[in-house]
Amino acid sequence: MQVSTIQPPSPRRAHEAQDPRGPAAPAAWSAQRIEQLLALPLPELLWQAQQVHREHFDPTEVQLSSLLSIKTGGCPEDCGYCPQSAHYQAGVDADKLMDAERVLEHARAARDAGASRFCMGAAWREPKERDLDKLVPIIEGVKQLGLQTCMTLGMLQPRQAQRLAEAGLDYYNHNLDTSPQFYGSIISTRTYQDRLDTLQAVRGAGMRVCCGGIVGMGESRADRAALLAQLAALEPYPESVPINSLVRVAGTPLEHAPELDPFEFVRSVAAARICMPRAWVRLSAGRKDLGDGIQALCFLAGANSIFYGESLLVTGNAEVDADRRLFERLGLRASAVQAQA
Ligand code: SAM
Ligand code: DTB
Ligand code: SF4
């Protein structure tokens, strides 16, 4: 049986030719079109994803980001997947913002282990002004170590985004998490529009956007397609797209979410690559449970970034030694720090 290639709509290509970052043309990838991609036979989907990947990246290079929780637990939001929410008993104690010196120790260790980007996460609904006063020297210190900087601190007002940008923050991570339709069954304390507004504030301040979602929360394939359509329609689409596989943490409402076929995760990665050709597509939470074979398929599907290091925010990550061995076995190498845009 002949399976036809699903072509991106033509305005997108014309638009990309003019802008080296390759922003999405509005409605370039509808949810319907992405659902068709997700339903392709896996070899067809991977083939399309690989072609797009090779047009824009060296397929043997993977970017390494390390993650640190700089303010853990006690979060007032009720995200149903999150062990740091104060609404659930997941055994995570609330902590204060970490001292700059300790953050820099972690950053130095991440750099020495080979990471090129250092991502700092805080379990806040949004940062307060006094928090920003403390974050500015942290950003400056991490940058001085030669690392790219990323933070995820919850919602931002435009002037807060401006302040972080002025301090030199390279990326801001704020995920859409899932489709607009499924969102309300996971989170009630902030709206989808709140998230889009924060992303707009980040863009407006000139920072690069890191935005993705979670796969495996009980959503349908149509929801995964709708999430990817939302991401691809951001103008421009995110430079960095984390695809998280739900970590089912005891005590959270999603503790017993039905297990998703791991090939659905691979499909989501491939579709993300196809509809956001120049983005860094990152294997994020849940990577250690995917196993080497599925991870290898994800790299073939166009994933080219991972979270690297002992832990994520509060849950465990794949072992550093295991990652090094996997890279060796697959002939992959860590990419150098990208030049500042
Ligand atoms: N508090 C900030 C916020 O939510 O905006 C930043 C930190 S939050 C932990 C960052 C992202 O981690 C979430 O948006 C979600 O996509 C992901 N995440 C959190 N818990 C997860 C889990 N158990 N499994 C997979 N991804 C998770
Ligand atoms: C993202 O999309 N995934 C990271 C990062 N952005 C901040 C967080 C994953 C968290 C996994 C569960 C935990 O350890 O808390
Ligand atoms: Fe709070 Fe972020 Fe966890 Fe939601 S995902 S509960 S905002 S730390």
Image (cartoon, rainbow, N blue to C red):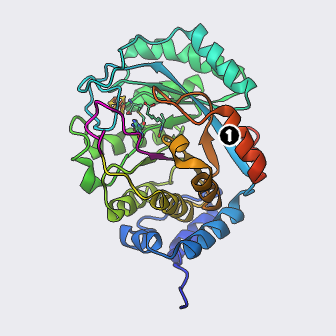
Residue to which mark 1 is pinned? 323
Q: Position of residue 145 (x, y in %)?
A: 72, 21
The residue under the point 38% across, 30% down is 154
In the picture provided, is 78 more to the left or to the right than 16? Answer: left
The 10 Å Cα crowd at callout 1, few under 14, some 14 to 19, many 20 or more, is: some
Relative to 45, does residue 108 appear above or below in the rendering? above
The kind of residue on which mark 1 rests is Asp
User: Mark 1: which secondary structure?
Assistant: helix
Q: Where does the magenta region start and end?
A: 243-256
Relative to 310, does residue 273 appear above or below in the rendering? below
Q: Position of residue 338 (x, y in %)?
A: 72, 41
The residue under the point 29% across, 43% down is 256
Q: Position of residue 132 (x, y in %)?
A: 45, 17
Task: Name the dominant secondary structure of the magenta segment.
Answer: loop
Closest to the observer: 119 or 127?
119
The residue under the point 35% across, 61% down is 226
Closest to the observer: 30 or 309?
309
Relative to 251, does residue 290 appear above or below in the rendering? below
Q: Residue furthest bottom?
A: 1
- Does the magenta segment cover residue 247? yes
Closest to the observer: 255 or 245?
255
Disc 1 residue: CB within 8 Å of ligand 2: no
In the picture provided, is 260 more to the left or to the right than 108? Answer: left
